[in-house]
Image: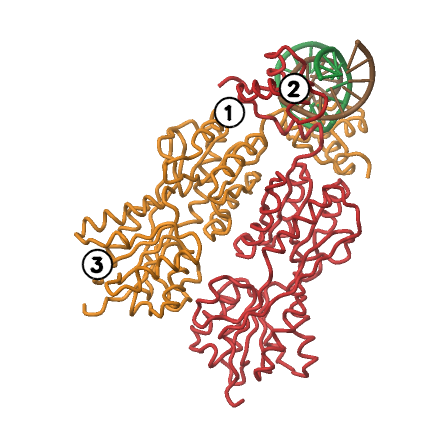
Chain colours: A red, B orange, C brown, D green
Amino acid sequence: MAGKTTIKDIAKSLGISPSTVSRALSNGPGVGGDLRERIRKVASQLNYVPNSSAKSLRTRKTKTIGLIVSDIRNPFFLEFMGGVETVLFPREFKFIVCNTGEDSKKEEIYIRWLMEHGVEGIISSPYQDREGNNNGTFYKKAMNSGIHVVFYDRLIEGISNIDSVTLDNEQAIMNGVFYLKDRGHERIALCLHKRGIYTIEERYSGFKKACAILGIHPDDRWVLEDMVNYSVSLDKLRSILTLADRPTAVISTNQYLNETVVRAARELGLDIPADLSLMGFDDSSLNELIDPPVTTIRQPVVDMGKIAATLLLGRIDGDRGEQTRVVLKAELLERCSVASPAGK
Amino acid sequence: MAGKTTIKDIAKSLGISPSTVSRALSNGPGVGGDLRERIRKVASQLNYVPNSSAKSLRTRKTKTIGLIVSDIRNPFFLEFMGGVETVLFPREFKFIVCNTGEDSKKEEIYIRWLMEHGVEGIISSPYQDREGNNNGTFYKKAMNSGIHVVFYDRLIEGISNIDSVTLDNEQAIMNGVFYLKDRGHERIALCLHKRGIYTIEERYSGFKKACAILGIHPDDRWVLEDMVNYSVSLDKLRSILTLADRPTAVISTNQYLNETVVRAARELGLDIPADLSLMGFDDSSLNELIDPPVTTIRQPVVDMGKIAATLLLGRIDGDRGEQTRVVLKAELLERCSVASPAGK
DNA sequence: TTGTAAGCGTTATCAA
DNA sequence: TTGATAACGCTTACAA
């Protein structure tokens, strides 16, 4: 009703000074236990709500961080955010969600907004295009102005002192290839999202490494790039799956692509795993219920979120130790989408 | 490097007054086009970053809203948030995500934080327990202090003047029951999350209404409540599905329960739809790939997000019109999980 | 068009 | 233990 009550109103109503009220309400020392109680009482009677803009202006602390995600539609982020919130809430930290949609410009804008907002830290999965362009300089700028940054899922190389938590993507895909080879597959296709993005490059490189180690030579044209939506993905899959000498197995590199391959196979009349094996990546709980249940490479996403938030809060709390780079291991969930190819 | 540059630094460096700089930088009138350009240039040279705490303190505007979600793990929110972000970004509004986890106390804490933070609005899906307790008074408090509130998905009854966007839950479930009856089902079970929650009550009531209209009388014990995790859900489903006179169809009321029913049926050796039909609710893109593809009641979630954000921005922009209550219609996606019961 | 000055609600420093 | 005062960085009457 009335204009918002401030610390001054409380002070006036008790006939004391604003500074005392401030001390009492922020649990600072130097206030009589008795007086403190009376102040608290009046504050709640007057419906006092602290003004954090004023507080932040004075203290330069907002208890707020920014969470930059590359694609808000990806179920990966639900789990990740869940992990982050778990850690942030008990510490009374709030987070602003920034969805870049793999748009470098949007990422830049959000970084600027976060700086203006006065966040104390940023947890980000940065974008990088195939030419290697990224927003590294903006993250640097944020760091220079005292904002701590933690990268998750993706890295920007050559930018120092930024803590990170990522997956061992190379190893994850290598294990996938090994698993397929064990079951007799040498004709393996790979589905990739946009080249340039850290995880995609790592997964691609893991694929090549594993093939080299095993001495197998999948056709270069079976490496499908830019699978960004269903219609282009279907076209690309069709182009390799309708040939006589087609691959016998496909490795997908995210949950969206798992679905895409299953759909495409159905549309092309290919049975999984009889006609085509699928090694999925990421794990929606639904992968188990799909026909057939999809064998998949699972990342510990919730942990990733918790670790990212913990690293960041550590820095905010004053940890000036060396850069931390946490690398998590993936797990291969064996289900039913991989078979041995005919004739083996 | 240096302490952050402020408007004063820019003013000093140009030998002009801070107010002129402020006017120039905030695109206000009353500044020479020439001067404005020079100010802009110096600002960027000095790496000027506006301090929004200071700005907010002065203007009482933060360009920030709060988004309260009841369970961050529910894929519903991914889509919803996506819709919200779409509308907010072009308007330069940021959002803070608050996960209550169906915990009334946590909801209250978040509302308080949002008020302190100075958000201009709150988009919320409020919790209510089976006794009807909710945080209505806190939402009222927020409203009274000038924070606009929009409810989505769920409502708190008897609290006036709050815009909302919800689903026509009663009709949605009624259509589901009608669909089942058309295919010969009269022995229908219903799976519910926590009673008390708005959507759950509405869906339950829709179920009863439809049964009354059709003159069918499912066993009361087939209405399963509190299906909050897999093990209790499995137990409850087992208790009704292992009886000789068991239901022939189950209606689920969220995506999580869709999965639960499918898993439980498999565990109990029941084939869907031969032994048991399933009418799902909510639609993950994966429902189509499940074995069998799940017939489901789909909500227009992205639209819901866009509408909620649009309503809120309208209020923030000064719309003082009557309370708006948008009620969206669900869509029944016919797939393969419903069959006619044996003997029909 | 530009400058002056007050004030937004806090906290922190210094005295009392 | 308490109070007076300045300051955080910005906007906005009002005056020039």
Marked residue chain, label 1: B
Please identify the quarter of the rendering in which residue B201 is found: top left
- The residue at which mark 3 appears reads as B186
Viewer-side residue, B268 vs B28 = B268
Identify the amino acid type marked 1. Ser
Q: Is residue B222 left or right of residue B107?
A: left
Do dots 2 and 3 share one subunit? no
Marked residue chain, label 2: A
Q: Is residue B250 left or right of residue B90?
A: left
- The residue at which mark 2 appears reads as A21
Q: Compute the Cα span from label 2 to label 3.
A: 67 Å
Q: Position of residue B262 (x, y in %)?
A: 38, 64
Is residue A85 shown above or below B246?
above
Labels 3 and 1 touching (C-beta < 8 A): no
Dot 2: few (<14), some (14–19), or many (≥20) neighbours within 10 Å?
Answer: many
Callout in the foreground (3, 1): 3
Q: Secondary structure at mark 2?
A: helix
Identify the amino acid type marked 2. Val
Please identify the quarter of the rendering in which residue A192 is found: bottom right
Identify the amino acid type marked 3. Glu
**Quick one: label 3 or label 1, which is nearer the N terminus?**
1
Is residue C14 shown above or below A205?
above
Marked residue chain, label 3: B
Q: Position of residue B334 (x, y in %)?
A: 32, 61
Q: Position of residue B282 (x, y in %)?
A: 39, 54
Viewer-side residue, A113 vs A324 = A324
Is residue C16 shown above or below B277?
above
Q: Position of residue A9 (x, y in %)?
A: 60, 15
**Residue found 47% across the figure and 81% down from its top:** A275
Q: Secondary structure at mark 3?
A: loop
- The residue at which mark 1 appears reads as B145
Dot 1: few (<14), some (14–19), or many (≥20) neighbours within 10 Å?
Answer: some
